[in-house]
Image (cartoon, helix red, strand yellow):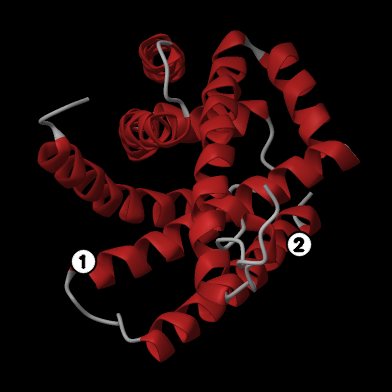
Amino acid sequence: MASDRPLSPHLQIWRWTPTMAASITHRATGVALYAGTILLSLWVFALAQGESAYAALAGFLGSPIGVFILFGYAWALLFHTLNGLRHLYWDMGRGLEVDQARLSAWLVFAASLILAILIVAGGLSAG
Amino acid sequence: MTHKGTSTFIAQRASAVALLFLVIWFLWTLSSHAGAGWEETLIWLAAPTGWAPMGLLIAIGAFHMRIGLNEIIDDYVNSGARGVLKLLNLFACLGAALIGLWSLFLIAA
């Protein structure tokens, strides 16, 4: 039955805020790091298997797709770690004011991106 | 998972603090070994200063990510599939940890 009454808030019409973006990104990077940890395990496995196995994986990780994956992994690791620090700070009952939480969300996004670019650029220049 | 909220909450934060230090080590050590070949990387991880933190990172990381994905399963799956998915999650985390730790053992031995 049609009604003139307003609909309840809908998932798609929320205005995005830095704090909610950081929250969902924390969860998304957590899932990405699940794959990242499996990749890390396989990397150690390839290393133990011998030079040709290691060379095959290292060759893939050195390709454009590989570098993209490594950049994603580095950024996810940095974001999840820095935002995890933010969560631990909240657990102490600090930084919970709206202004503070908004500022720390921006800081985590910016710092994780800058550090990821620096680390991957440094790795590329080292070969 | 019922009646386990508090212990899971504490376990996730305790492992987070451990991972904080291990991730700092990981990023620092990767930066300083970037571009290393197979043999050089092998020598690096065969030393206790290599395999010990790497083993802790993989083991505690697997522990932490199991709790995290269980949380997501609890949030979005509301049926009988929940138990199966959590079991698969356990196997995946155990598998990743065991492959990593066993490989480190082979490298260090």
Relative horizontal placement of residue A4, taking residue B91 as reference (left or right) = right
Find residue A53 and report its horizontal and vertical position in percent.
71, 13
Relative horizontal placement of residue A48, taking residue B68 as reference (left or right) = right
Amino acid type, callout 1: Asp
Residue lying at 51% horizontally and 33% vertically, measured from the top left: A34
Looking at the rendered structure, which numbered label has been put on residue A91? 1
Find residue B102 and report its horizontal and vertical position in percent.
40, 11
Subunit of label 1:
A
Mark 2 — residue?
Answer: A121
Looking at the rendered structure, which numbered label has been put on residue A72? none
Find residue B8 and report its horizontal and vertical position in percent.
19, 37
> A104 or B34, which is in the foreground?
A104
Query: Mark 2 packing: few (<14 Cα in 10 Å), some, or many (20+)?
Result: few
Q: Total of numbered circles in the picture?
A: 2
- Element marked by disc 1: helix
Query: Mark 1 packing: few (<14 Cα in 10 Å), some, or many (20+)?
Result: few
